[in-house]
């Protein structure tokens, strides 16, 4: 069994209601517990919510452990729209040789350069890869969302190595936690003409349904048909395009 200890620099000694939302689905209530509190579990990846009373004020705290299987990104006022459902590839980084314009996606959960890597493919723009980028010539690192125009890196991006002809650009400089996964919330893209973005964890990896796609699926069910997550995502993609 693994152990997860919930602790705080401000609220140790206080009693909080702890609820765990595993990425695998559902929720687990641990009831009212004194902080710090240690949980023994084999399934610890997910979001932990702690509600407590601090001098008469209700405080709601949250902590994330591990990278979500998918994240939704909604870009606003972006010249290159990087909105989409990004799927977790694994821990790793992108290696870039600025002399040859060669890129390699390195999946390695032991390297200090590794952060959570995510991939989204758009039929309009190509592949967007979110994660740490190492320029092996300049010896620099930066977490980015990099667009590779009209390049399809599915279904096995790990180990992919690619060179021109193609073009690439930086779509955003996303916010990551010190633990190496993207932060939820609203942020500026950090790139000129790329506006802002909203990022939200989506452990189920189901697309937010398009209004028309949702209405179509409701008609299918009303007519006696059935759907599943794969069908839902495919129909949603068709209606969005």
Image: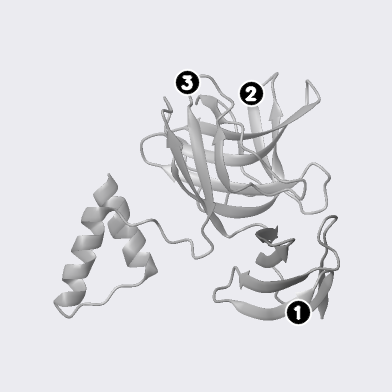
Residue 185, image quadrant: top right
Mark earlier in primary sequence (3, 1): 1
Q: Residue at x 51, y 59 (%)?
A: 202
Query: What x and y, as percent, mark residue 190?
Result: 59, 26
Nearer to the camera, 48 or 182: 48
Q: Are marks 3 and 2 in contact (CB under 8 Å)?
A: no
Disc 1 residue crowd, few under 14, some 14–19, many 20+, Cα 10 Å: few
- Residue named by callout 1: 41
Q: Secondary structure at mark 1?
A: strand
Q: Is residue 135 visible?
A: no
Image-based side of 196 in relation to 142, left or right: left
Numbered disc 2: secondary structure: loop
Q: Return the mark for residue 193.
A: 3
Task: Give percent across and percent down for residue 239.
Answer: 24, 51
Q: Residue at x 81, y 61 (%)?
A: 11
Asked whether the viewer can see residue 23, the reply is yes
Q: CA distance from mark 3 to mark 1?
A: 45 Å
Residue ID at (65%, 72%): 20
- Badge 3 crowding class, 10 Å Cα cut-off, few under 14, some 14 to 19, many 20 or more, is few
Q: Quick check: marks 2 and 1 in contact, CB under 8 Å? A: no
222 or 29, which lies in front?
A: 29
Q: CA distance from mark 3 to mark 2?
A: 24 Å
Q: Is residue 66 left or right of residue 4?
A: left
Rounded to the nearest angstrom, the CA distance separating label 2 from label 1 is 45 Å
Using the rendered view, name the quadrant where residue 142 is placed: top right
Q: Position of residue 134 (x, y in %)?
A: 74, 32
Give x and y (percent) for residue 55. Answer: 74, 61
Q: Residue 101 has which mark?
A: 2
Judge the density around disc 2: few (<14), some (14-19), many (≥20) Cα neighbours within 10 Å: some
SS category of the residue bearing label 3: loop
124 left or right of 113? left
């Amino acid at each position: 069994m693994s152990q997860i200890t919930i602790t705080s620099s401000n609220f140790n000694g206080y009693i909080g209601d702890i609820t765990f939302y595993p990425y695998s689905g559902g929720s687990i209530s641990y009831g009212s517990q004194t902080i710090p509190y240690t949980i023994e579990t084999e399934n610890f990846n997910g979001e932990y919510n702690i509600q407590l009373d601090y001098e008469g004020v209700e405080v709601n705290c949250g902590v994330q452990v591990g990278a979500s299987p998918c994240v939704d990104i909604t870009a606003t006022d972006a010249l290159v729209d990087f909105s989409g459902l990004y799927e977790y590839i694994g821990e790793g980084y992108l290696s870039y040789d600025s002399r040859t314009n060669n890129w390699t996606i390195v999946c390695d959960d032991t390297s200090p350069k590794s952060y959570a890597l995510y991939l989204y493919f758009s039929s309009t723009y190509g592949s967007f890869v979110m994660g740490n980028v190492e320029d092996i010539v300049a010896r620099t690192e930066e977490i980015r969302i990099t667009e590779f125009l009209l390049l399809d890196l599915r279904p096995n991006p790990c180990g992919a190595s690619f060179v021109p002809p193609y073009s690439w650009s930086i779509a955003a400089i996303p916010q990551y936690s010190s633990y190496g996964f993207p932060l939820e919330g609203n942020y500026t893209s950090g790139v000129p003409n790329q506006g802002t973005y909203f990022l939200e964890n989506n452990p189920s990896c189901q697309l937010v349904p398009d209004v028309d796609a949702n209405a179509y699926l409701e008609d299918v069910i009303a007519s006696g048909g059935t759907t599943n997550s794969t069908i839902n995502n495919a129909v949603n993609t068709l209606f969005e395009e």
